[in-house]
Amino acid sequence: MKNINIQWVTQDVGLFELDWLCEILDAQEADINIVRNFEDFKTDKNSLVICNHAVNYRVCLDALRANGRQYGVFLLSDENLIETCEWLHDPNCLFSIRNYVHPMYFSHPKVTTIGLGYKKDFKKYLTHKSAEERYNVWVFAGTPHGDRRKMLDVFESIKPNQTHECSGFCSADALTTRGYAEMMTDAIFALCPPGQDSMDSFRVYEALEAGCIPVVLARTAKMPIYPSYWHAVVQSAGVTDVPFILADKWENCANTIDRLLLDKSFIPTQKECQHFWINVKQKWKELTNTKISYLKI
């Protein structure tokens, strides 16, 4: 990465996505310059600018442009799909990597969409267990707001299970990263409802990283994507088959789990998910590194 700067413009003290960024960018922590003040932003080279809409990253893009530098934008947020992404029209902007499928930008020639990834330190607490070695059929950790309570009621009869309810994202009463990782490692299936503001959720990618089978809704009224939202997320990896448990209703997902438990086909399904995730991550890594190579001139 010596030929370019990788700069993360953020006020997130915990650097939630750090481990995921290092993996997907094939980088070390030392390769990523954490920018909390504009004075620390470098304009001596072309840059990959990692950012979200909670910070004024556009002033950094302006500085690069004023210095004749080219850049790419790695947009971590935009779960509400409100970013105008006006910098895509700038010739100095060579590409954008983003989370969250946005219908307006999904086919844009400069835009590549990838998944949210997993939280910092999550991987280091994971242990490998086959589906047969896992105690709980399913688990869920999070805030049971809205339709999530109904979801939990649908799956309650499928036992054993484990839930941990908390008051909000990264709240004080949430599981520790270690506790969350250990809970996921001991489950065959992980319930992954939509986030509060988006169809997408960190849970899906953390479930895959932990060797669980994600259980998701295929689409929502806000995201009526066919064959599913998840097919759209992994399309950039050239993947057409998604081995998750997915349906339009939680009841249908629960019926599928019952069937997989009855004939023990959850065992090959877990292996399919593991192979799927390894392949998708590798493809995303290749894509991001190809994009970054555009800046190395």
Image (cartoon, rainbow, N blue to C red):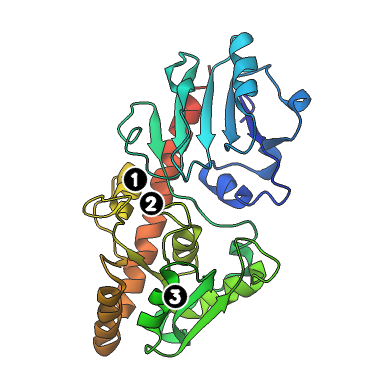
What's the amino acid at mark 2?
Answer: Val
Circles 1 and 2: CB atoms closer than 8 Å = yes
Residue 217 location (% of width, % of height): 32, 64
Secondary structure beneath dot 2 equals helix
Reading the image, the residue beneath label 2 is: 280
Residue type (three-letter) at the residue carrying disc 1: Ala
Which of the marked residues, 1 or 3, is nearer the chain's N terminus? 3
As helix, strand or loop, the secondary structure at mark 3 comes to helix
* Amino acid found under the numbered disc labelled 3: Arg
Which numbered tag is attached to residue 237?
A: 1
Q: Is residue 2 above or below residue 255?
A: above
Q: Quadrant of residue 262?
A: bottom left
Residue displayed at 44% across by 49% down:
115
- Between marks 1 and 3 in the image, the one whose residue lies nearer the viewer: 3
Q: Answer yes or no: is residue 212 visible.
A: no
Q: Residue at x 64, y 72 (%)?
A: 175
- Residue 121 pos. (x, y %): 65, 60
Residues at marks 1 and 2, CA–CA distance in whole angstroms: 6 Å
Q: Nearer the viewer, residue 206 or 217?
A: 217
Measured Cα–Cα span from mark 1 to mark 3: 33 Å
- Residue 149, numbered label: 3
Relative to 250, residue 262 above or below: below
Can I make out residue 209 in this image?
Answer: yes
The 10 Å Cα crowd at callout 2, few under 14, some 14 to 19, many 20 or more, is many
Element assignment for label 1: helix
Q: Earlier in the sequence, mark 1 or mark 2?
A: 1
